[in-house]
Amino acid sequence: MSKEITARSQDYAQWYNDLILKGGLADYSAVRGCMVIKPYGFALWENMRDVLDRMFKETGHQNAYFPLFIPKSFLSREADHVEGFAKECAVVTHYRLKNDPGGGGVIVDPEAKLDEELIVRPTSETIIWNTYKDWIQSYRDLPLLVNQWANVVRWEMRTRLFLRTAEFLWQEGHTAHATAEEAVAETKQMLDVYADFVENYMAVPVIKGVKSPSERFAGAVDTYCIEALMQDGKALQAGTSHFLGQNFAKAFDVKFSNKENKLDYVWATSWGVSTRLVGALVMAHSDDEGLILPPKIAPIQVVFVPIYKGDDQKAAIDDKVHEIMAELKKAGIRVKYDDGDNARPGWKFAEYELKGVPLRVAIGARDIQNNVAEVARRDTRSKESLPLDNLAGQLVELLDNIQQSMFNKAKVFRDEHITKADTFEEFEKLLEEKTGFVSAHWDGTTETEEKIKELTKATIRCIPLNNPQEEGKCILTGKPSKERVLFAKAY
Amino acid sequence: MSKEITARSQDYAQWYNDLILKGGLADYSAVRGCMVIKPYGFALWENMRDVLDRMFKETGHQNAYFPLFIPKSFLSREADHVEGFAKECAVVTHYRLKNDPGGGGVIVDPEAKLDEELIVRPTSETIIWNTYKDWIQSYRDLPLLVNQWANVVRWEMRTRLFLRTAEFLWQEGHTAHATAEEAVAETKQMLDVYADFVENYMAVPVIKGVKSPSERFAGAVDTYCIEALMQDGKALQAGTSHFLGQNFAKAFDVKFSNKENKLDYVWATSWGVSTRLVGALVMAHSDDEGLILPPKIAPIQVVFVPIYKGDDQKAAIDDKVHEIMAELKKAGIRVKYDDGDNARPGWKFAEYELKGVPLRVAIGARDIQNNVAEVARRDTRSKESLPLDNLAGQLVELLDNIQQSMFNKAKVFRDEHITKADTFEEFEKLLEEKTGFVSAHWDGTTETEEKIKELTKATIRCIPLNNPQEEGKCILTGKPSKERVLFAKAY
């Protein structure tokens, strides 16, 4: 096989890249840090996007679209925000090229310099709140529940396919409310939507929590997050939901008259998930043979491969497969019949294993006679011979089973990798040997957090929601602490 | 009413802007030439996008995503292409801001200059064909049928909401083929898809044709187009499909080995429609009271407005409306019940007229007793009292009727505005008095085309497909001509 995958045990990072590249999800591009999302990868993202979009609409949100460009001065309006994003902004300075008088193709036309430089949006709070100023006058205009699907650019120095790219696709919700309570409730609701999606569609268990101040979104009062665990024991932030207080309303002077006819600043939230989730999905489930995709979002849920000699045998198999596929399609299942004659069945088997198709059904001429088919599960790599009678029904059940089983497996792994440390020595040892989340006391200061990061590379992933309160001592400083927080090395 | 619309007869351009802004489709933004697509406008675009996306997938295309940025040097690889786009490119030159040492917020960090400037994509042929080089080796990799939904930027000097904006949303198909015949067939197929969509969903009749050389896409061998007519008698190009020959394959050295194992350059097509279609939709159908949206893509197809005094009356109306709405939803109809008590029925009526909702159903307490409802059609502004029995079924039929009737009305208007001119005097007169398309003989030269444009502002919109051949003389030069072409003033 030319498409050999590096083993996880050998080189985890290379294993990941092999899966992304050879599994047909994405490709490097000619532009530094930007990737090409290939058709198979994009179909996966589309399935994810469509589920999320439905969830957003069911919770009352509408989509809109705001400009790609942000005037440079907008970024400065909110002090923390500019601090957080200025260092990684792509900047548009000119609006025209012209022929190089020296004959070297085209050059930037120095006469076409913009009066004010434009930033390619790294996130859209500023341009959106500048617009909300015109949309919000009264409490009757609230809540304003808007989402945007868009590309954003953050000029990251070290990039990795899907996990960290200069340009990525995401959705960003931006809502406006009359009260702090309502905005906080929205922030938490969207965190729940994300957790629901990641757990029940991506089959990846998450921990919901709040970020420590140093890990907060630039401009937020509170950042809520969901944290997932990858197979190498590193954590990955899978989604964030921010309570922005009145920070952006103040920065862009967005006031509303409340029911008592008094003017007040509007309360805000923002929340987002991105194509990074594809990376999380790959790292959470796949194995050394290739991708393992959860049925609910897999581009192909069941693939049929015929095994035959000659046209007569094939015709009989075709009939049967088309019959079963029709039933599956009726049940809303995404199916493919790979009856191309340019590859042998064994090659096809390997290809669909690599691509993570949840179920593979092989049907030969003798199978038709025996009224059976060979059904292979991608997640467990187990095969069984199933009767052709009501095969569609059995496959639908198996898909449900795989979805649940993938979540359970990931949850067992995750739960095994949450451990407690009460001393710094224990903490370091757990991070090294056991990996995963380490639950430990912390004195609540940014200094200590940074020191721990420096010493161990672990960061506070979150302070879990509904965290049990318990007296303890900070693992580093010994100062008193009221609760444990979750540390981990992270993507 | 605060939302008064300028009459078409008074100021057509202002009428259009009023509809877009007051109808809630879009808003100006703080960034020159860029617009904000508001939720109602975006819902309309989503409906259009979803239909097109389904059509693309049904014809075998897959979606993918390529980088927003294009290295400047890529643009120069195809001579016509750079000539066509260099003058309207947003250029990224830096990747970081820093604090202004002078204290004036942030400035562009001069040390963060890119080695090669990046162009914000005006269209993606170059970055995509640079990628296809890695994807295509053999005839087995062909055809490659890819589409991308994306934002693109063309730094237009004069912009108009939806019709011409610096940033716009679109789809761009980019396909690769083993033979010229196959690529030409693809080009024409996608033109047919566009025509099908614009006629049968947007209810706007179009003329299919080929562009004259001077109106060709930069880098194309042939540009096919669909041309629509607006109510002011101006034409609007609603979609284009390009046969690119081997131009981009040569520019990016994309060769494949054919069945005879010989290397040859790949044949290409590209095709696109954009948010400009929203502008076409508005201009083709709307009236002085507001938008008129075709049912098939209207965000709300039927709106219910209760007319009542007191809770008892309202409860009875609620029950009935919910019952009818449930039936409509089952039939896939997008409905809204506006029972808010913050506005009078008359205000709501005007609002939904402005927003172009195809059907409005008003139900009062007495209507319930009489077992009727008042149904108002937006397109004809006619009202009728319909029995509540099987009202849902009647409404579904009415929606079909409106869709067809809107197309018919637009087609009658369009057909009345295609006239023939045999002399230049006639030509000028028709353009002035009758407006619309003028069918006339042309000597086939770019010089004549330009001269005619200079004299009359009319351009050749297209040479219609299956154009009858007829001997004639060019209206300007009197030189012999074999066929008439369609001229018009255009958006």
Image (cartoon, coloured by chain):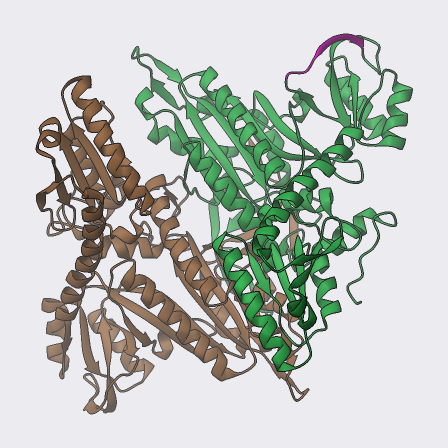
Chain colours: A brown, B green
What percent of the width, then of the height, locates residue A184? 45, 79
Can residue B147 be found in the magenta stretch?
no
Whether residue A98 is visible here, answered yes or no, is no
Is the residue A18 above or below the residue B438 in the image?
below
Q: Residue at x 51, y 57 (%)?
A: B327
What percent of the width, then of the height, locates residue B77? 50, 28
What percent of the width, then of the height, locates residue A384? 8, 44
- Residue at the farthest front position: B370
Residue B413 found in image quarter: top right
Can residue B472 be found in the magenta stretch?
yes
Q: Is residue A246 left or right of residue B23?
A: left
Viewer-nearest residue: A481 or B38:
B38
Report the magenta stretch's main SS: strand
Viewer-nearest residue: B62 or A317:
A317
Is the residue A285 above or below the residue B205 in the image?
below
Magenta stretch bounds: B466-473
Is the residue A25 above or below the residue A252 in the image?
above
Q: Is residue A359 left or right of residue B102?
A: left
Whether residue B405 is visible here, answered yes or no, is yes
Residue B424 found in image quarter: top right
Q: Residue at x 15, y 33 (%)?
A: A363
